[in-house]
Image (cartoon, helix red, strand yellow):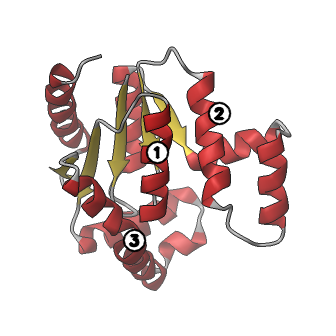
Amino acid sequence: MFNLILFGPPGSGKGTQSEKLIEKYGLVHLSTGNLLREEIANNTPLGLEARNIMDKGHLVPDEVVIGMIDNSLEHHKEAPGFLFDGFPRTLAQAEALDKLLLLKNAETDLVIILDVNEEELIKRLVNRAKTSGRSDDADENVQRKRQEVYKRDTFPVATHYQKMKKLVHVDGMGEIDQIFQRLCSIIDKKRKSTPQ
């Protein structure tokens, strides 16, 4: 099993690249947003708990999110691996994921962070607003705040995996296919050195 975390600030291209990587490597896409919607739609105990929390305007706690990831790992036992997208977002989530994978005799094999300079990120997000229909994407100040939240809350996760020697920086600037080739060369190299 090969487990990959694709990491980067809002606008770095994680969603676009995730789709291409899933298609190429046959990994199961683990997006916590999708998992949450799925559990709620299926009225599972975790989904009902999450809906109850969200209806009160609160964030879904890490234990619930980890429970959903656990369900997904169990449901896809035959998968060649997983691509974690948008998770972990905090150090506590990273540590919880490490523990969960350890219980499954697995681990995070590789964490790739897409490096894109902030001005390019803002430009991409403001441009995305023209097609996404999300009015908040168009506000440059909102985008700058999102980058600050990422640096404060999420970037420490990269340091966690760097200490474990699992983090690789990839240049996220340029054409989509160029970036995809950079990602593939790192993934292919890592998969060759990882027992499947």
Q: Residue at x 60, y 58 (%)?
A: 62
Contact flag, marks 1 and 3 (Cβ < 8 Å): no
Residue 15 x %, y %? 43, 46
Q: Which mark is residue 150?
A: 3
Q: Quadrant of residue 194?
A: top left
Query: Mark 1 packing: few (<14 Cα in 10 Å), some, or many (20+)?
Result: some
Distance CA(mark 1)–CA(mark 2): 15 Å
The quadrant of the image that shows the N terminus is top left
Residue 119 x %, y %? 25, 74
The residue that label 2 is drawn on is 71
Query: Mark 2 packing: few (<14 Cα in 10 Å), some, or many (20+)?
Result: some
Contact flag, marks 3 and 2 (Cβ < 8 Å): no
Sequence-wise first label, 1 or 3: 1
Q: Can you say whether 135 is above or below 47 in the image?
A: below
Residue 182 in view, yes or no: yes
Q: Secondary structure at mark 1?
A: helix
Q: Can you say whether 155 is above or below 84 in the image?
A: below
- Name the foreground residue: 94 vs 59: 94
Q: Quadrant of residue 147?
A: bottom left
Amino acid type of the residue tagged 2 in the rendering: Asn
Q: How many marks?
A: 3
Distance CA(mark 3)–CA(mark 2): 27 Å
- Name the foreground residue: 7 vs 158: 158
Residue 13 x %, y %? 35, 51
Q: Can you say whether 49 is above or below 182 in the image?
A: below
Point out the frontmost of discs 1 and 3: 1
Q: Which mark is residue 99?
A: 1
Q: Quadrant of residue 9?
A: bottom left
Query: Mark 3 packing: few (<14 Cα in 10 Å), some, or many (20+)?
Result: some
Point out the frontmost of discs 3 and 2: 2
Amino acid type of the residue tagged 1 in the rendering: Lys
